[in-house]
Amino acid sequence: MLKHTVAITDADTATPVLRSISMIVPQAHVVSNLDYLATGTFPFVGSAQGEAKITDAVTGELLAAGVDKRIGGGNLSTGFQWQLGDAENAVNKWCEMITNRLASWTSGTAIP
C-alpha cells in the first residue's frame, strides 16, 4: 500500500491586461524580453510550485519525492490568460507528467 502527499506550496497570479499589452505591443514586448534576460522570468506572469512524496504505508520507506516550479511564458499564445491560468497550466503539466511516468512504470518501459 502507498501513502502519498501532494501539495501546491506556492501560486502567484498573473496580471492579465498588463501581460497582454506586454505581449502584443512590440515596444513593450522588447522591454519584457529584456526583463526576462535580467531576471529569468517575464513580467506580469503567474507561477505555481508543487511538492509530492510517496512512501510505503507499512514500512514508511520513501519511494519517490519531487518538487517543481513552473513560471508562465512570454509568447503571444499565453498573453490572454486569466489570473491563475499559468498555475492551471502547471497543474495540467504535472498531471501529464505523472500519468506518463505511471504508465511507463506499469508497462515496464521504465524502472521506478
Image (cartoon, rainbow, N blue to C red):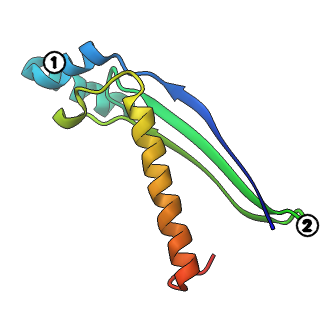
Q: Residue furthest bottom?
A: 108
Residue carrying label 1: 28
Q: Residue furthest top?
A: 17
Spot occupied by residue 69 in the image (x, y as percentages of width and height): 51, 41
Work out whether residue 31 can be spotted: no
Q: Quadrant of residue 10?
A: top right
**How many numbered discs, if any?**
2
In the rendered view, tell whether residue 26 sits above or below residue 1.
above
Q: How crowded is mark 1: few (under 14 residues within 10 Å), some or many (20 or more)?
A: some
**Image quadrant where one finds the N terminus:** bottom right
Q: Viewer-proximal residue, 34 or 62?
A: 62
Residue carrying label 2: 58
**Residue located at (43% from left, 36% from top):** 88
Residue 48 in the figure: left or right of residue 30: right
- Residue type, numbered disc 1: Ala
**Residue located at (49% from left, 51% from top):** 94
Spot occupied by residue 19 in the image (x, y as percentages of width and height): 26, 20
Spot occupied by residue 2 in the image (x, y as percentages of width and height): 78, 64
Spot occupied by residue 110 in the image (x, y as percentages of width and height): 54, 80
**Image quadrant where one finds the C terminus:** bottom right
**Residue located at (60% from left, 81% from top):** 111
- Residue type, numbered disc 2: Val
Work out whether residue 32 can be spotted: yes
**Residue located at (15% from left, 18% from top):** 28
SS at circle 1: helix
